[in-house]
């Protein structure tokens, strides 16, 4: 009896991600000028350019933590006011928003927006008016990240001679103007946004 052994080549398998910091404006206690949701807000966040090797990239995800705080007395911005945040990858827009009355992004803003989220782990009877819906967060709960697959957009940019793809990332925001009844540029004198965002790149490697 003869036995012949053949080598079986393994398929490329995703390995650990690389995190690329994008736009970040500090923590809750910083109260930096980059957080105030006024007419200067969008000017603080310049476009970011990087390059990815399509043959070595398995997936690309946008990871965002974003919460609104404060109240300016006119618009209730930004704790109880909807805000819209657009992250563009090579010109393809991805929107983080809670449209008034739509409940698009939990916790939905509204009189009982956070109370409706108790099945997900929000602590009832928490500090303050816990039942009120807030902009991206609730009392007694952790801020939940927004994770979005942007692989197709990220690898759709111009290709350089080296084979790498251009990835241009842009960020801008707007607020729901309760007086005008539409989305407008930020104009709150006191409300502020806490933002943390990264690009998570999952590489491909042989096992």
Image (spheres, rainbow, N blue to C red):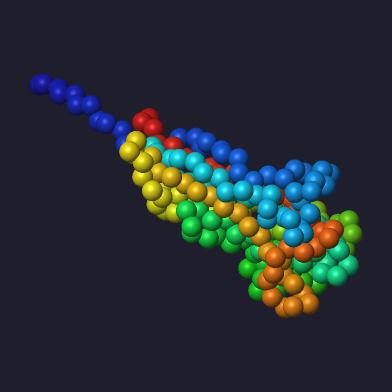
Task: From the viewer's perspective, tell me whether residue 128 is left or right of residue 134.
Answer: right
Of residues 152 and 189, which is closer to you in this image?
189
Q: Residue sitting at 41 percent across and 50 percent down?
A: 157
**Where residue 41 sits in the image (x, y, percent)?**
72, 55
Q: Is residue 108 visible?
A: no
Of residues 112 and 166, which is closer to you in this image?
166
**Where residue 131 sits in the image (x, y, percent)?**
82, 65
Q: Residue sitting at 68 percent across and 71 percent down?
A: 183
Say which quarter of the image contains residue 67. Answer: bottom right
**Where residue 85 sits in the image (x, y, percent)?**
64, 60
- Residue at the farthest left position: 1
> Can you say which quadrant of the picture contains the N terminus?
top left
Of residues 25 and 122, which is closer to you in this image?
25
Q: Residue sitting at 80 percent across and 46 percent down?
A: 32
Task: From the viewer's perspective, tell me whether residue 121 is left or right of residue 48.
Answer: right
Task: Answer above or below: position of 74 versus 203.
Answer: below
């Amino acid at each position: 009896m003869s036995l012949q052994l053949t080598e079986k080549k393994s398929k490329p398998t995703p390995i650990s991600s690389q995190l690329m910091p994008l736009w970040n404006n500090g923590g809750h206690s910083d109260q930096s000028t980059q957080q105030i949701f006024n007419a200067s807000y969008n000017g603080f966040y310049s476009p970011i350019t990087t390059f990815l090797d399509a043959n070595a990239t398995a997936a690309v995800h946008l990871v965002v933590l974003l919460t609104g705080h404060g109240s300016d007395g006119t618009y209730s911005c930004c704790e109880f006011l909807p805000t819209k945040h657009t992250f563009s990858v090579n010109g393809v827009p991805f929107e983080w928003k809670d449209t008034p009355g739509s409940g698009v992004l939990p916790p939905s803003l509204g009189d009982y927006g956070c109370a409706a989220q108790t099945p997900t782990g929000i602590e009832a009877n928490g500090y303050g008016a816990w039942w009120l819906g807030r902009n991206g967060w609730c009392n007694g709960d952790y801020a939940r990240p927004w994770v979005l697959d942007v692989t197709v957009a990220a690898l759709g940019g111009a290709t350089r001679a080296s084979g790498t793809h251009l990835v241009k990332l842009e960020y801008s925001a707007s607020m729901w103007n309760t007086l005008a009844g539409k989305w407008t540029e930020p104009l709150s004198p006191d409300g502020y946004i806490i933002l943390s965002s990264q690009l998570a790149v999952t590489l491909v490697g042989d096992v």
